[in-house]
Amino acid sequence: MAMAAIANPCALSPTTALASQKLAAPHFVSPLRPSCSSSSYPSLAFHKLHILIKPRLQIAPRRFEVSPLRAELSAVADPETDLEDGEAGSESAVATVAAPSKTKTGKAALPLKRDRTRSKRFLEIQKLRENKKEYDVPAAVSLLKQTASTKFVESTEAHFRLNIDPKYNDQQLRATVNLPKGTGQTVKVAVLTQGAKIDEAMNAGADIVGGEELIEQIKGGFMDFDKLIASPDMMPKVASLGKLLGPRGLMPNPKAGTVTTDIPQAIQEFKKGKVEYRVDKTGIVHVPFGKVNFSEEDLIINLMAALRSIETNKPSGAKGVYWKSIHICSSMGPSIRLNIREALDYKSPAA
C-alpha cells in the first residue's frame, strides 16, 4: 500500500503525500513537489521521486600540495611565462592608474595651499618682512616699495577687513574716495547724455560722448572705456544695459557718483583720481591707492584718504569693533600688516 502511494503520489491527498515522503526519507525533505504529468507511468514517477529524495553528498575539492623544490624548479624553468605575467600585471596597473578622471574647473582646479610653490623672487622679497608683525604706516609704505621688484610698475593696494556682513541692507558699504595724488592710471571716461550737455561733456574732457547711438554700440559689445557717466534723464534707457554693464562694474550709480547732473565736475574727478570701492561678500574692501613709483609721502597721503573715507562711510548696522585688519601690498608682492590703532591715529602730511 505504501509502495503504491509512493509510486503514484498524485493519487493521495497533499497531507498523505507529504507524510509518505517523510516515511520514505526522514533525513531529507524535498523543496519540490513531484510532477503529476507521469501518473500513467508509475516507474517514471518513482524514478523522479527517487532523484528528489536521494541525499546529495558534497564532495570537497582535493588539495594538491606542491613541494618547495618543485615550485622553485618550475619558476626557473618558465621565466618567459613569469615575464609575460609581470608585463600583463604592469599593463593592468598602468591601465588602472591611467583611468580618466573628471576634469576639475574653477576653484577646485587650483592647487591646495600646501602644494603651491612660490617663485624665487617672491621667496627672496618675503624675507624682507617679519611674519605676524604689525607695522606703522611709514614703515609699511617703505617696505612696500622695497618688495616691488618686477620689471613693470606695480600698483599699490590696500585691503581693509571690516566687521560687517553685506547680506544685511544696513551693513552694506559702497562709496567713492578722491585720492589727492591720483591713481597713476589714465582713465577713459564715456558719457551718456543728450541735448546741450553733449557739448559740456566734450569740453570737460570726456573721451566718448553719445546718447541712444552709444547705447546701441554698447549693446553690440563696445566696452572701450573705464568709467561710464550718465545724466539722470538717460537712466530709463540705460536700464536695458544692466546685464552687460553690471558684471563689469560699469553700470552708472548715484552712490558711485556716475549718475549726476554736473557732468563736467564728475569727469574731472574721475580723471584726477576718484576711486569707487565697495565691500565684498567676505567683508573686505579693496582699494588701489597709487603706483610704486610714487613717493612714500604721496602713497601715505592716498592711503590715509582711503582709510578716512571708509571710516566716514561706516554703515549704520555695523556693531562692535569696526576694523579687523589692514594690509597693504604691491600687485606682485607679499602683504604687509598695519597696526590698526596707529593707522587710525596717524596724521598724514599735508596733501
Image (cartoon, grey):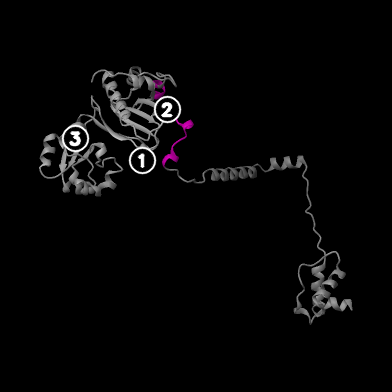
Residue under label 2, please give it: 118
Q: Nearer the viewer, residue 295 or 119?
A: 295
Q: Quadrant of residue 125?
A: top left
Q: Residues within 10 Å of mark 1 (few under 14, many from 20)?
A: few
**Residue found at the very far right of the displayed protein:** 1
Residue 230 picture location, percent across and down: 19, 42
Q: Residue 204, position in %: x, y?
A: 13, 34
Tell me which amino acid carries mark 1: Asn
Q: Give the residue type at disc 2.
A: Arg
Residue numbers of the magenta segment: 106-125
Label disc, if present, on residue 266 of the rendered structure: 3
Q: Secondary structure at mark 1?
A: helix
Q: Residue tagged by mark 1? A: 169
Q: Is residue 338 visible?
A: no
In the picture, the disc for residue 77 is: none
Specify whether 22 is left or right of 316. right
The reply to whether discs 3 and 2 touch (Cβ–Cβ < 8 Å) is no
In contact (CB < 8 Å): disc 3 and disc 1: no
Query: Which residue is rendered at x = 79% and y = 78% of the image?
Result: 10
- Helix, strand or loop at label 3? It is helix
Mark nearer the N terminus (1 vs 2)? 2
Residue 300, given in percent of the width and then of the height, sits at: 29, 21
Q: Quadrant of the N terminus?
A: bottom right
The part of the image, by quadrant, that contains residue 28 is bottom right
> Which mark is nearer the camera, 3 or 2?
3
